[in-house]
Amino acid sequence: MSRHGAGTLASLWLAFASTGAHADAAIPVFVAQGEQQVAFAPWDDVEGLIVKVIRGAETQVLVHAYLLTSKKIATTLIAARRRGIDVQVLVDSEQVAKTPLATEMLHEMDRAGIPVWLETKYQNAHNKVIVTDPATSKATVVTGSYNFTWTAQHRNAENILVSRRNPALASRYTSNWERHRREAVLYKK
């Protein structure tokens, strides 16, 4: 690289660093607490782990999905709703529109009384998060690359992190979920 190119790169870096430092100051840092569990598909039963987390919910399940076509996860959400758990779902509208199985899962959840919102504002509403019992000491966050699909478990290389008993972390994810819900459109068949 020429001296001129290196100088330009250095000045770009300095400009980025000076503006980026202020943005980082506003992003919360959380002290590690609770338990962390990591799973990798296709080797680990990630879908089974997600089902177990949902089954363990005592008050609330918030789902933030790019795509939700897993029948096991959808039926577990419906079962949670039937046992009195507040279950709410956000999904990417484009993925629903082009995936008939996703539409079928949404119809089933809607019929079961689960409110579902479609995210329309973003090119990709690419979140893959489940938060359970966020207002309790048992607050749990599930996040990672894993889409809530059969393919994610059986054909893809995916990961998830389950963070249990971390109310501060769950609160941050819940606030983000709420912000997205306010921007989304309520799904009705």
Image (tube, helix red, strand yellow):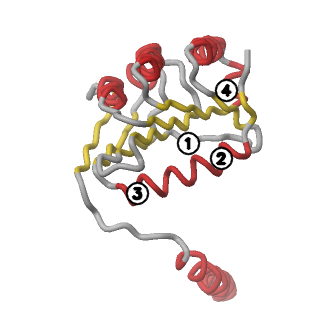
Tell me the quarter of the picture where residue 61 sits.
Answer: top left
Mark 1 neighbour density, 10 Å: few (under 14) some (14–19) many (20 or more): many
The answer to whether one can see residue 109 in this image is: yes
**Does the residue at mark 3 contact the one at mark 2 (Cβ under 8 Å)?**
no
Which residue in the protein does label 2 denote? 180
- Mark 1, residue position: 127
Q: CA distance from mark 1 to mark 4?
A: 12 Å
Q: CA distance from mark 4 to mark 3?
A: 27 Å
Image quarter of residue 167: bottom left
Q: Nearer the viewer, residue 120 or 152?
A: 120
Considering depth in this image, is 134 or 76 the residue closer to the camera? Answer: 134
Label 4, secondary structure: give it.
helix
Which residue does the image show at 57% across and 23% down from the upper left?
114
Task: Say what secondary structure mark 1 lies in.
Answer: loop
Check disc 2: other Cα within 10 Å, few if <14, some if 14-19, many if 20+.
Answer: some
Image quadrant holding the N terminus, namely bottom right
Q: Earlier in the sequence, mark 3 or mark 1?
A: 1
Identify the secondary structure beneath mark 3. Answer: helix
Question: What residue type is disc 1 on?
Answer: Asn
The reply to whether the C-beta atoms of the residues labelled 4 and 3 are less than 8 Å apart is no
Instruction: Judge whether 92 appears above or below 175 on screen.
Output: above
Mark 3 to mark 1 CA distance (whole Å)? 16 Å
Tell me which amino acid carries mark 2.
His
Mark carried by residue 49: none
Q: Residue furthest left?
A: 35
Measured in 3D between alpha carbons, the distance from the residue under mark 3 to the one under mark 2, in whole angstroms, is 17 Å
What residue is disc 4 on?
95
Pointer 1 and pointer 2: residues touching (CB < 8 Å)?
A: yes
Between disc 4 and disc 2, the foreground one is 2
